Each structure stands twice: as structure tokens, then as C-alpha cells.
Amino acid sequence: MREHIDEQIIKHNGVPVFVVVPFDAYQALKNQKNPNWWADETPHEVVGSVIKGVSPIKAWRLFLKFTQKQVALKAGMQQSAYARIENNTKLPKTSTLEKIARGLGVSLGQLEF
């Protein structure tokens, strides 16, 4: 669980553009060992995409700004096979889902909404 940080949100024309945090909180965030801040969470953008009907695999790929080819390569599979799984046209085995999760850098549970 994360501790509460007293941040200040600076807006321009009503849109958040900067967040100011206390320096010690900034240093603690900067020095975290896990650069994947989403390691134990699922970002709002991913959840929102899934609610709109996008598969969790595709939602994560888009959030992380990977191409299908990049994820397929990291997962050790053909891009065409990955595309069928991502677009829900083929139900993958658990072992295949594990490879995709590793390729995306997320946990298996984060792909199973």
C-alpha cells in the first residue's frame, strides 16, 4: 500500500499539466527499485479500455506503447498468432498468457480481468 502524498496539481485552462510533490516524496518515488509503478496495480487507462470492450492484453499493449510485433517478439511467438489472441479470436493456453504477460512486463493476474 502506498502512503498518502500531499501533492499540488497545477492546471492550465482546467486541464492538469503539472504535479508538485514534497521533495522527500519525490526522492522516495525516484529511488524505488521497481521502475514499473503499475506492478501491483492496473492503471485507469487500462481498466477504461477494457470496460469499452478492448481485451486486457491489447489495453496493456496500447498503454505501454508497444507494437504487436514488439510484444510477440518478447513473448516468443509470431505476430499473427499474437494478434489473434489480442483480438479475442483465439483462446490462449495459460502458458501462452504467461509468455505475453512477461513480454508486457505485467503479472498474469493483470491480464485476467
Image (cartoon, grey):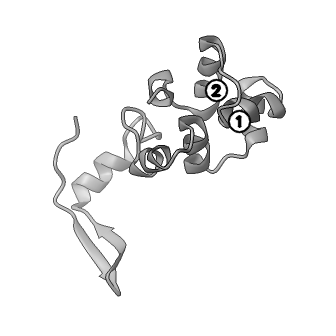
- Label drawn at residue 71: 1
Badge 1 element: helix
- Do callouts 1 and 2 mark residues in contact (Cβ within 8 Å)? yes
Please determine whether, in this image, residue 22 is positioned above or below residue 17: above
Observer-nearest residue: 32 or 47?
47
Residue drawn at (79%, 40%) of the image? 69
Q: Residue at x 49, y 50 (%)?
A: 52
Which numbered disc covers residue 100? 2
- Residue sitting at 41 percent across and 46 percent down? 43
Residue furthest to the bottom = 13
In the rendered image, the vertical position of residue 90 relative to residue 60, given as above or below: above
Residue 89 sits in which quadrant? Answer: top right
| Observer-nearest of 56 and 100 | 56
Residue 61 in percent (x, y) is at 61, 43
The answer to whether residue 36 is left or right of residue 92 is left
Locate the C terminus and report the quarter of the image it occupies. Answer: top left
Rendered location of residue 5, percent (x, y): 19, 54
What amino acid type should be assigned to the residue bearing mark 1? Val
81 or 72: which is nearer to us? 81
In 3D space, how far apart are the residues under numbered discs 1 and 2 (Cα atoms)?
Answer: 7 Å
Q: Is residue 76 left or right of residue 8?
A: right
**Image quadrant in which you'd find residue 77:** top right
Label whose residue precedes the other's in the sequence (1 or 2): 1
Q: Quadrant of the N terminus?
A: top left
Q: Say what amino acid the circle numbered 2 marks.
A: Ile
Tell which of 25 and 63 is nearer to you: 63
